[in-house]
Amino acid sequence: MSMITLEHSAVSLIKLGFDEKKFKEVIPYILEPDAIRRYSGPRVLSHFEKIGNDVSWMKFPTRENLKKVNKENIWTLCEHHLAEGYLNSVIGEETQISVYETYNKHLDPVNYIAVKNHLIQDFEFDIFVRQVFDCSRRYMDIYKFNGEQLDGKGMRELVQKLSEYGLYRLAYLVYKESGIVINQQWYDENVKKALEQAYSEDLAEGTYKYMKIPEKINQWITEKDFDHFDEGLIPVEVYDDLYTKVLKKMHTM
Ligand SMILES: [Zn+2]
């Protein structure tokens, strides 16, 4: 299960000590494992998921190739291996960060650490989701939250809500520590532009179009109105534990 790209960005800004200049340099590479799926397809590849005894993997494009990669040429530019028998369940299998490391030593150090930090964020988020929801029957497309049964579609909607309130919490933490207001306008200026520089036009557009803060939450963030945490699915302390853990595990960029 992936963290949403909005959350990946906010966590990374905190890790960088609110240095927006550095943030713009690294954010295209932090978002790369999700962005590249526009061309690489199943999550298992760019997230190194284990199936049985096999792990899917891919070599991420170099910075230069990231500018020209597309659906047609991706597998000539990037070696890969798709493990057999993967199932497209809402919740995936565990990300194997050591397999990422094995196949991606060709990346320059900044790119390498940024992608790794994305995978660390997703790894911890995945554990978090499995604590909030009962996912033990995921291959039957059955999930449980607070005793209530959900199908994959219902599950996806709740995870989306979980992520949105996570972003709202992160926006509060960022604002409290730095005074920076990470609303949609901030994302336009700091993420959209950075993606346009590092990615092809198609990849930048295809990635950023999903980075839309829901209107209500964007308004709260803009107005610095941080009084709505009790409207989320889970207590705010649970988010704080997750982000503390993620930040501790991420590498310095
Ligand atoms: Zn991801």
Image (cartoon, helix red, strand yellow):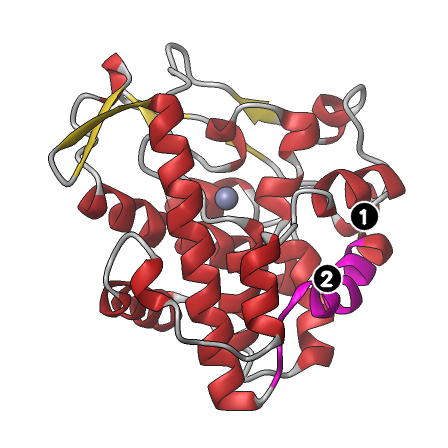
Give the CA distance from mark 1 to mark 2: 12 Å
Give left or right: position of 108 versus 6.
right
User: Amino acid under label 1?
Assistant: Tyr
* Image height of 111 relative to 55, above or below: below
Pick the quarter of the image with the N terminus.
top left
Give left or right: position of 89 versus 10.
left
Q: Is residue 216 magenta?
A: no
Residue 15 appears in the figure: no
* Image height of 225 relative to 82, above or below: below
Q: Which residues are magenta?
A: 180-195
Q: Residue at x 70, y 27 (%)?
A: 39
In the picture of the structure, the residue carrying the numbered disc 2 is 191
How many tags in the picture? Answer: 2
In the picture of the structure, the residue carrying the numbered disc 1 is 199
Considering the numbered disc 1 on the image, is that residue within a helix, a strand or a loop? loop
Is disc 1's CB within 8 Å of ligand 1? no
